[in-house]
Image (tube, helix red, strand yellow):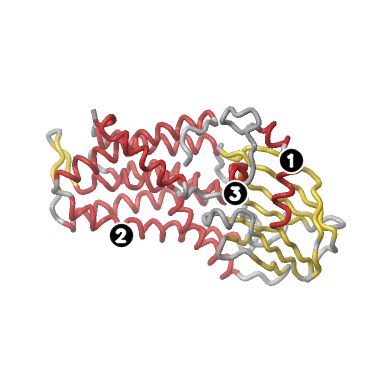
Amino acid sequence: MIIRRYFSVLFIFTLFLQADILKENFITFDLNGSSPSVLVDFESDNLEKFMSLDDNDNGIISWKELKAHKEKIEKLVLPHIHILSDNKQCQKQVKSFEVYRRVHQSYIKLDLFLSCPIPKDEISINYDLFFDVDKAQKAFVKLKEQKSKPIILSARKQSVTIKLENHSLWQAFKNFFIEGVWHIWMGYDHILFLLMLLIPSVYIYKDKRFYPRGSFKEIFIEVLKIVTGFSIAHSLTLGLSVSEIVVLDSRFVEVAIALSILFTAINNLYPMITKHTWMMAFGFGLIHGFGFANVLHDLLIKDSKDFLAMLFGFNLGVEAGQMVIVTAVLPVLFILEKTVFYKRFVLYGFSAFAAIIATLWAIQRAFGLSLIPF
């Protein structure tokens, strides 16, 4: 009954989120050879805005079709990349074209040969690929096998000059703090999990019924325990994973995150864990920490002097972004807790919606499908 009643909500939210999916690009300079080169990785889904790739009209873009359009793709991408080595323009030439999978997205990797000297002081890049059609795009720039910090490019910041010496710890911290904030805000699965924990926090469950807590102080303490448990847990596994002390398969982690949302949503509909929910937040938070770490594995160099600054900055950014969400949601929970609307549409309705979304996420992440566009 609940699922049927609120299935229409799934369609509305799908349309809303489809335009705001975070796309990540990775730019890696290799300055160790006789001449510089650069690897450019981007999600293949971006290309559908610019060219027709579905040659057999079956609704699925295969790797074979992507490779068949190699020249068209290169012609699209190269004009959006401009590189200077010590203020000297570098000409670009494609050495290799590769299609591969990262988590649950198909990526294209271009290995570019740069016809310019190895820089002595600095290397600069101007990169605006896809930024004009998708403001949520991010590009992560780093130097391969060198003690340097990754730089984050976006529609607001399309150029960067990397100094080959004297890196700033503060700059590394600041860049990754901002990235941490944006990652939690664009991480729909993490936000949905947090909301599934927060929504029932205004109630006490006893005698098979939900009763309003009534006191803002009681609600605040319950929310504080939940958020603290979640934060400590994901901070712990984030540090362990990016330090390569404990590393889990990324597909397993993504599926487990979806299942954590499914469990908490079902728990809201059919309560099983009704006391000490902060312990549930802590347990599932351990899994979400590995999910946060998946973003950083390709960006951080474990032996870099900037490693701790970047790790701490990202984690603090996640916490700051999370607190903004909690601060915005908490007053709403308190104001609406005693209304029929809250119990029927927020607790039951939104939890049913979350259960549907989490189920679809788990299936598509486990089997590499594209059931929903976010």
At label 3, which amino acid type do we have? His
Residue at screen point 60% across, 53% down: 130
Q: Secondary structure at mark 1?
A: helix
The disc, 2 or 3, on the residue closer to the chain's N-terminal end is: 3
Q: Are marks 1 and 2 in contact (CB under 8 Å)?
A: no
Q: CA distance from mark 1 to mark 2?
A: 48 Å
At label 1, which amino acid type do we have? Lys
Q: Is residue 296 left or right of residue 88?
A: left
Q: Residue 3: which quarter of the image?
A: top left
Q: Horizontal and vertical percent for residue 129? A: 64, 55
Q: Horizontal and vertical percent for residue 181? A: 46, 59
Q: Which residue is mark 2?
A: 327
Q: Secondary structure at mark 2?
A: helix
The disc, 1 or 2, on the residue closer to the chain's N-terminal end is: 1
Q: Which residue is mark 3?
A: 297
**Relative height, residue 162 to residue 200 (above, below):** below
Q: Is residue 19 left or right of residue 82?
A: left
Residue at screen point 72% across, 66% down: 124
Task: Answer whether residue 145 is visible to the viewer in this image.
Answer: no
**Relative height, residue 133 to residue 43 (above, below):** below
Residue at screen point 43% across, 32% down: 360
Residue at screen point 62% across, 71% down: 168
Q: Are marks 2 and 3 in contact (CB under 8 Å)?
A: no
Q: CA distance from mark 3 to mark 1?
A: 28 Å
| Residue located farthest toward the right when viewing the structure as drawn | 34
Q: Which residue is mark 1?
A: 70
